[in-house]
């Protein structure tokens, strides 16, 4: 299965924030949308980073409440790992596991942002594949007997 199949099921909406927005703005947006990460775009609208709940916790641990007025660019992960729509889900899962992050922006053929996948999306897909494979094997065994 490919990343595009995940996007077909969950949609292609990506919640973004500008690099000049404040950490407080990011926290409010994450809370309002009930999500774990935001794609950060620069002034020209290009992907420049990602800011996650984990980044916000680090910012608070290091700077206290004063960090809420900092720009997102001060605490985001710049140049995050990305994937493309035709990447296999298994390879994206490997990248996430190796890099110890939970969100990956998805780019289309023209390298434009077209979605975001989370580790939850990947695990859900892998579980569905495993269940389908097990059912197919049971059917095959039943037909052979």
Image: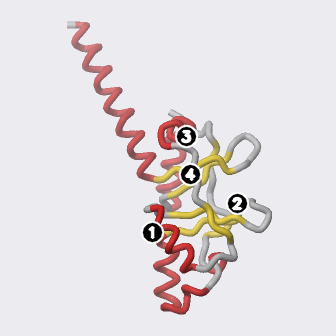
Q: Distance between the residues labelled 1 and 3?
A: 26 Å
Q: Nearer the viewer, mark 2 or mark 3?
A: 2
Residue under circle 3?
A: 3
Q: Is residue 72 above or below residue 140?
A: below
Q: Nearer the viewer, mark 1 or mark 4?
A: 1
- Residue 114 screen position, x and y as percent: 64, 47
Please tell me which residue is depicted at 50% across the width and 74% down the height of the picture.
27
Q: Which of marks 3 and 4 is in front?
A: 4
Q: Earlier in the sequence, mark 3 or mark 4?
A: 3
- Residue 66 screen position, x and y as percent: 54, 92
Q: Residue 31 carries which label?
A: 1
Q: Residues within 10 Å of mark 4 (few under 14, many from 20)?
A: many
Q: Residues within 10 Å of mark 3 (few under 14, many from 20)?
A: many
Q: Which of marks 2 and 4 is nearer the N terminus?
A: 2
Residue under circle 2?
A: 47
Residue under circle 4?
A: 116
The C terminus appears in which quarter of the rendering? top left
The answer to whether residue 8 is left or right of residue 107 is left
Q: Quadrant of residue 67?
A: bottom right
**Marks 1 and 3: CB-CB under 8 Å?**
no
- Residue 113 screen position, x and y as percent: 67, 51
Q: How far apart are marks 1 and 4 (CA)?
A: 17 Å
**Marks 2 and 1: CB-CB under 8 Å?**
no
Q: Residue furthest front?
A: 32
Q: Earlier in the sequence, mark 1 or mark 3?
A: 3
The answer to whether residue 107 is left or right of residue 127 is right
The answer to whether residue 49 is left or right of residue 8 is right
- Residue 41 screen position, x and y as percent: 69, 64
One can see residue 100 in this view: no
Q: Distance between the residues labelled 2 and 4?
A: 12 Å
């Amino acid at each position: 299965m490919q990343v595009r199949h995940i996007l077909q099921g969950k949609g292609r909406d990506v919640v973004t924030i500008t690099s000049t927005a404040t950490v407080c703005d990011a926290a409010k947006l994450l809370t309002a949308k009930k999500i774990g990460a935001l794609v950060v775009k620069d002034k020209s609208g290009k992907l420049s980073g990602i800011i996650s709940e984990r980044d916000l916790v680090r910012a608070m641990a290091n700077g206290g409440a004063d960090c809420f007025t900092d720009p997102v660019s001060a605490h985001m992960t710049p140049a995050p790992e990305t994937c493309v729509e035709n990447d296999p889900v298994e390879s994206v899962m490997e990248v996430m596991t190796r890099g110890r992050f939970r969100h990956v922006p998805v780019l289309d053929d023209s390298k434009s942002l077209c979605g975001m996948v989370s580790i939850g999306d990947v695990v859900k897909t892998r579980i569905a594949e495993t269940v389908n494979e097990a059912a197919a094997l049971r059917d095959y065994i039943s037909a052979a007997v």
